[in-house]
Image (cartoon, helix red, strand yellow):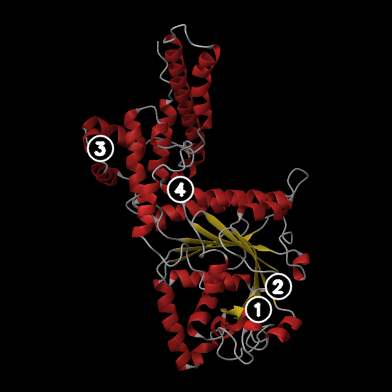
Amino acid sequence: MTHTLSDVGAERAVLAGLFNFGVDAYVEVNDLIDHGSFGNQNNQIIYKCIEKVLQNDAVVDVPALLAAAKQLNFSDQINTESELQYIRSLMDFPVKQDNVLFFAAQIKKYEFARNAKKIAKRIEKGIDDIKGDESIDDIISMVESPLMDFLRDDDTGQRPEQLGDDIDAYVDFLIENQCDQIGLSTGYSRFDAVIGGGLRRKCVDLVSARPGVGKSVFADNVALHNARKGIPVLMLDTEMSKDDHLNRLLAHISNVPINEIATGKFASDDEKVIAVRAAMEEIKSLPYTYVSVAGAPFETVITTIKRWILREVGQDEYGKTNDCLVVYDYLKLMSSSGISNNIQEYQALGFQITELHNLTVKYDFSCLSFVQLNRDGITRESTDTVSGSDRLIWLCTSFSQFKVKSQEELAEDGPSGGNRKLVTLKARHGAGLMDGNYINLNMVGSHAQLVEVNTRDEIRNQPQGIIAGADAPFEVDDDDDDCPFDVD
């Protein structure tokens, strides 16, 4: 009796889970399995159809499944009485969402075993074809080469390939799709240039800051800039509420102070009411999604990103993730229970940046993340001023410090030099900044506005009385005394 090396029950449970729980179950299993993981061919087709339905952000029911089957040219296999009866039985199959991943793991084991069996047959055939004039090394190679090919496959099933393969098509694509900037713009042209062309796909760009400096204002300004261009933005916040973000965005767009918006006092001024309502209408039209992940395990953060990309962002006709931006404010240990003798805070942050980096690669999107500077970062500008710095620096694409300027720097740069500085210490794709140079920004916390001004070198190299990037001196708003709300 031949062993089919498949678990029909596990396959049935996974498909039932996808029917019952939709994208919530899909994001749990799609990193582990694909249609080829199923041993039964009909189950492979059903999985592909379900995947198509979910990518179209539809409910997984029979009509949606039939529509997907038609698009994938599987109508003949799906639209039969027996198959429809089987599909309806899957919809009624009792399975708990928490168990779907377990059954997916079972399916994956059998897929691995089937692939191993194919390798064994390949080895057996090679040995059966021996003529006797082979060397011992040749015979060993018949066993070793297939095994090495099998073991070289990574978790995504990708195999090593010649670097020059398909290079003609790649160069033609570059010629036909010329662009001014390779990544998404942050809204700060100097910063974009320094890090090598904006926020690139498959990358995590990291900005560090001390509490209260304004990193969340930075985050909202970058997010708003992209959302205004029609690019979907996901803001993952570990501290601030939705109301906090709304107050800031309304203030930023309407130019009405945050405290007047948060207290409703703008209502006494007709012009401010008009400005706030106009800002409200703009915000309603923006593809800007906010999710509070305060206290959530990092695994939940990862799942939230995957779910958003599948539901809100989608793919183009070639299966490539559409342009989008994830802003994560910020990398930190969510609870003290995560620190133990076995895992320290720096190790936990290392795990987070590893998972986040891997996710950007797999799902092909851009990510801007923030992290807190330790106390050394107040006076020092080096890559070891954050917890878990080694792992964070290895895996981020760029690393910058966002800081309040010292009194000496304020005096040296002059009134048009702004009150914040951005120091880029690592830029994998860009030139970075020379030692002592930094990007000047001016933050008006009362209106949640952050404007890029110039660089320190630009100020030094300009003729006296001319400041690059600034038409008039800024009013220094360093302490935000006129705003009683947190502006971090």
| Type of amino acid under label 4 | Asp
Label 1 sits on residue: 456
- Mark 3 and mark 2: Cα distance apart in space: 63 Å
Other-residue count near label 2 (Cα within 10 Å), few / some / many at <14 / 14–19 / ≥20: few
Q: Is residue 315 placed above or below 192 in the rendered structure?
A: above
The image quadrant that residue 41 belongs to is top left
312 or 142, which lies in front? 142
- Name which of mark 3 and mark 2 comes first in the sequence: 3
- Mark 3 and mark 1: Cα distance apart in space: 62 Å
| Type of amino acid under label 2 | Gly
- Mark 4 and mark 1: Cα distance apart in space: 48 Å
Label 3 sits on residue: 74
299 relative to 253 in the view: left or right: right
Label 2 sits on residue: 436
Which numbered marker is on residue 90?
none
Residue 437 screen position, x and y as percent:
67, 73
- Name which of mark 4 and mark 3 comes first in the sequence: 4
